[in-house]
Structure formats: structure tokens, C-alpha cells
Amino acid sequence: MRIYILRRLVAVVPTILMITLVVFVMMRSIPGDPVVALLGDAFTEEDAAKVRQEYGLDKPILAQYGLWLAKLAQGDWGTSILSGRPVLKDVLVRLPVTLELIVLSMAVALAIAIPAAIIGALRQNTWADYSATTVAMIGVSIPEFFAGVLLLLMFSVALHGTLPSSGWVYLPGTCPMVVCTGSVWANMMHVLMPAIALGIGRAALLTRLLRASMLEVIRTEYITTARAKGLAEKPVVLKHALKNALIPTVTVMGLQVGFLIGGAIVVETLFAMPGLGTFGIDAIIARDYQQVQGFALITAFAFVIINLIVDLTYSLLDPRIRYA
Amino acid sequence: MSTLRNVELPVVGELVDAAPATERSESPLAQALRRLRKSKTALCGGVIAMALVVVAIFADVLAPHSPTASDQNHTFETPSRAYPLGTDQLGRDMLSRLIHGSRISLAVGVASVLLALFVGVPLGLVAGFYGGRLDAGIMRLMDLILAFPIYLLAIILMVIFTPTAGLIGTIKVVGAIAIVRIPIYARLVRGSVLSIKEKEYIEACRALGVRDRSILFNHVLPNSLAPIIVTTTLGIATSIIVEATLAFLGLGTQPPTPSWGWDLKANVAFIHQNPWLALFPGLAIFVTVLGFNLFGDGLRDALDPRMK
């Protein structure tokens, strides 16, 4: 197992190198550069050349990428061209916000999907099943930002600001400023709407998938055996059927991470959250090369690591799957 | 049509067995169409999709006002008889904007999927049929695109293309979304080609001396059509969501061209004073996506009941 994880971690390196290289080349193929934005309208070519030299922007692209990698190996993620702050510092401040959002949205998705799928599968073709599948169909068709707008209309407009419509309160301990009041309660109030907005689409997708695989599993012989030997319905469903039906669902959850990262950009923009999503989109639009590289690196890393975790979850769900 | 007749569908055997011996056996296409007509979901989705197409085509006739003409005397009007869905901060009629916005959503949704299809399907066919280095080369490139979180790639592509208004702006969005979706078709088609090329009728073609190109397009492609059709319909729904998301982030077709995603973004700022302004563009996106999802679902059940 340990060797397997190590081998997978080594295999992660080329993927991350490829993704960061492609982003590097793509960002630099955009006409114009951030130096012009940094210096404003009144700049001379001399100034611009000086700044370009300072940030190494006058070198060939591959040489620049090599330089970035060499610095990265020493733990230096570069410095933002526009804000002058170290990229790693910004990423570390923003990472907990996005992680909290993504983890909670997954929790929302599972909390809705598991009961809905079980009801749908156990009572197939009854009104309960029909309403579960109809709601799931509606859920997959709602883009995250519209789900967010609906929540805003409900909690911020109709209920007169029960939940805050934008901004962020940090969890105690993750606060970047020296003077800062972190509060678990206020944090929960701020993260609730974004997490539901991001989770609702995933919930719908997982419900559909899980219901389908539950239907398949429930007709297998070992479920009949479990019932025949007198097991109560609850352990049959939860211990025998659900655990096996979860395997394909977990795979899809891993694949959904790409969507969750994109969804995080949208939801963080809508609710004005200081997370990695807003960090990334602001960096890409401002062409802040170093920040974009930092964003691409952390995204690619998260993507690959989560897929590794997904693969490891299989052996938890099904002990027959072993990794040597 | 004749090429469609030998489309191999999984249920043929079952249905023929179940049917009374006296009944004439119908072609797989006719069976699929019959099942499609019976499906309430497909019917519902089809009606929504068709209605939207009609709205988009006749937008100029249907829209009561101009979608771009501003009227400073009628800003933030609540829904009334003159302005059924109210007006925005520039006094533009929301209903007319929604009607015209359907063009962008549908055009981008359909065109990007078709473009991805026309590039992805041949790539998958060639990769699966010839195998070897060509296959490895094509599929590694596809894996590279798939390794990106879809929105990240689409966003960077749009920044590279620089978003603009009008037709050119729309074409840029179509290009960005198509590039992101090419690998989906390439992988799908490659998968079916790998299994089809081992079938006996392909071996028979080879023995008869049929040329590769003819085998590929007359025999392999028609037999892998069912999953392609389903993925295309559902893909339109996804593309419409991606387009709206890009527009919401300010990276879609630029104003003054009316676009649902952009309208939603612009009006979220006024959500406390004028809630309907953000609601209607969002509802339009939702109904459109729902329509294509329902139709795609029904189509999948009709073409391949095993996938239900």
C-alpha cells in the first residue's frame, strides 16, 4: 500500500509539470504583458524594458519556465507582478477558504444524494422515486450561479438578510491579518449559501448515479441471501447494498473535482469570497503570470491528489480491491 | 438514411424475440423512433428545445422592444403590460433581451458541440482504427486537455482570444468551448471503434478488399452513432451552462450583444432593490438546459435502454 501511494505520487509529477507548462505557454501567448498594466499609461519603453528584465520576462519562454521551476524547487513560488506579494503566501491564505467551500459542498451533495438515492431505488416507480428523480433532473440543470442567485433571493432578499450575501469571516486560526476576529458561527453563516449553491448540482448528479447503481446492486444474489438469512432491512441496505453501490459514485465524485474547482470560481465571484477561485480569475484576467502559475500549480496538485484519494477509497469500500 | 439502417442497437434481439412472429420486423431506427415518441421526458424536452429554436429564429418579430435601445425614462420598471418582465438599469426591456439572448445561448450551445464533434469524431475513429503510435499520440493530446479542470482551460482560452461583441465574439466563445469538449468525443468514439473493429462484418469487409476509408465511414461510424447522438444532445446542455458561466465571469460575448449570463451578472448587483432582474435571465438559462437534458435523457433511453 505504502509503495503504491509512493509510486502514484511520483507519477503525479509529470502531470503537474505538463499542466503548469501548458498554462505557462498559453498565458504568455496572450498579446500584451502585465508590465504595461503595472506601469500605467505613462511609461517609456526604457522603463518597461527594465521591469521586464527585473522579472525575467525578456528571456525565451522555456528559459522562463525553467527559471520558475528552479525557484519552485527551492520553495519560492515567485512574486506577484502587480501586488508585489509572494504568491505562496497569498495561496496559503486563500486555500483554506476554498477547501472549506469544496468540502462542505461535497458534504451537502452527499447529505442530499444518499437518502434520495436510497428512497428512489428501494421504492422504484412510486411517487417518492418520481419526485426524487424529478428534483434530481431539475438540480442537474441549474448552473451554480443561478442556484446562488436563488439562494440570495430567498435568504438575503425575501428573508431580509437572514444570511449575509457577500464577504467572509475567517475560521479562527486561518485569519491572514494581525488584527482579525475569527468566529466559527459567523464563518458558517457566510459559507452556508455558497456551499449549498455549489453542492446542489453535484447532489443531483450523485442522486441519479447512486440510484442507478443501487437498483443494480439490490437485485444481486448476495442481497437476496442477506435478506434470506434474516438480516434486518437497515443493515442490508446500508451495509451491503450502499457500500457496493458507492464505488462507481466515488469515481464520478473524483471526476467532479474539476467541475468543483470551476464552480468555486463562479460561486466565490458571486458571493465575493476571498478564496482561490477569485484569486485565479483575477490573476488570469490581469495576466499576473506568477499568480496564474501559482493558481495552476495548486489546482493541478489538488486535482491529482483528490483522484489518488478516490482510488484509495475503493479499497475501503471493497476490500477485494487491493493495491500492492 | 440507408447507412442508418444497419445501426446496431442492443435491444434488437430482445424486441424481436418478444414480438409475435406474424409482425413484420422493423428497423432499429424505427424502433428507436417509436420508443422516443412514447417517452414523456423526451417529448417534454423536445417541446422546450423546439420552442426555444422558434423563439431564437423569430426573435426580431417576437420581441416587443429593441434589446439594446436604452430609455432613461423607464429604468428599473417593475413587470407591467408594456414591459412584461420589467426593464433594467438602462431602461432596456428585459423580455426583449431574453428573447434575443436565446440566440447566443442556442448558437453557442449547438455550434460548439458540432465543432467538437467534427474534430473529435474523426480523431477518435482514426485513433481507434489504426492504433499504435498514431493512437498513442492523439490520445495523449486528448488526455492533456482532459487533465485540465474544464472551466480553467475555457477561461484561459477566452482570455487568449480576448472577448468581443457580435458575431466574432460569439465565434470565439464557440471555439473555446469546442476545444474543451473535443476529447470527450474522441474518447467516446475510440472506445466504440475498438470493439466494433473486431466484429465479423468488419473482417468480412477487409476480406472483400473494401478500402479503409470506406470501412471507417460506411461501417464503423454508423455503428457507433447511438452514444454519439446521446452525448451530443446532453453536450448542448453542458455547453449552454459553460457559455453562461463564461458570460457570468465577463468572458463571454460582450455587450451590447444580449446574453443571459451577462444579464444575470449585471443585475445581481441590484438584487435587493429589483429581484426580478436577476431571476429572469437565470430562469431562461435553467429552462433551456432542462429542455436539452430531458430530451437527451429520453433519447438515451430510446436508443439504448440498457443505459437507463
Image (spheres, grey):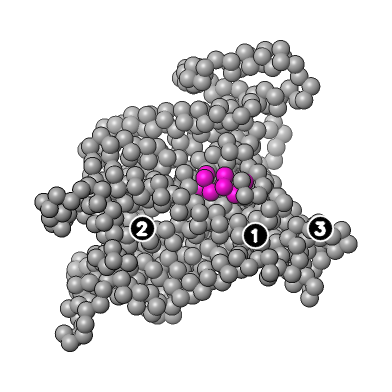
Q: Residue at x 19, y 72 (%)?
A: B13
Which tag, 2 or 1, sits closer to the chain's start?
A: 1
Instruction: Name the disc covering residue B70, or none.
Output: 3
Question: For the residue carrying disc 3, how many other residues have a C-alpha within 10 Å: few (<14), some (14-19), or many (20+)?
Answer: some
Is B171 positioned to the left or the right of A134 in the image?
right
Residue at mark 2 to residue at mark 1: CA–CA distance? 28 Å
**Residue at mark 2 shares a chain with residue at mark 1:** yes
| Mark 3 in CB contact with mark 2 (< 8 angstroms) | no
Question: What percent of the width, then of the height, locates residue B248?
Answer: 63, 50
Classify mark 1: helix, strand or loop.
helix
Earlier-in-chain disc, 3 versus 2: 3
Residue at 55%, 15% (x, y): give it.
A59
Mark 1 residue type: Gly
CA–CA distance in space, label 3 to label 2: 44 Å
Q: Relative to residue B127, is residue A195 depicted above or below?
A: below
Q: Is residue A71 left or right of residue B29?
A: right
Taking the image as shown, residue A207 lies to the left or right of residue B216, namely right
Three-letter residue code for mark 2 = Ile
Question: Which segment is the magenta one?
Answer: B169-177
For disc 2, the marked residue is B228
**SS at badge 2:** helix
Residue at image location 70% in from the left, 50% down from the top: B255
Is B185 part of what is drawn in magenta?
Answer: no
What amino acid is labelled 3 in the image?
Answer: Ser
Q: Are marks 1 and 3 in contact (CB under 8 Å)?
A: no
Q: Which mark is residue B101?
A: 1
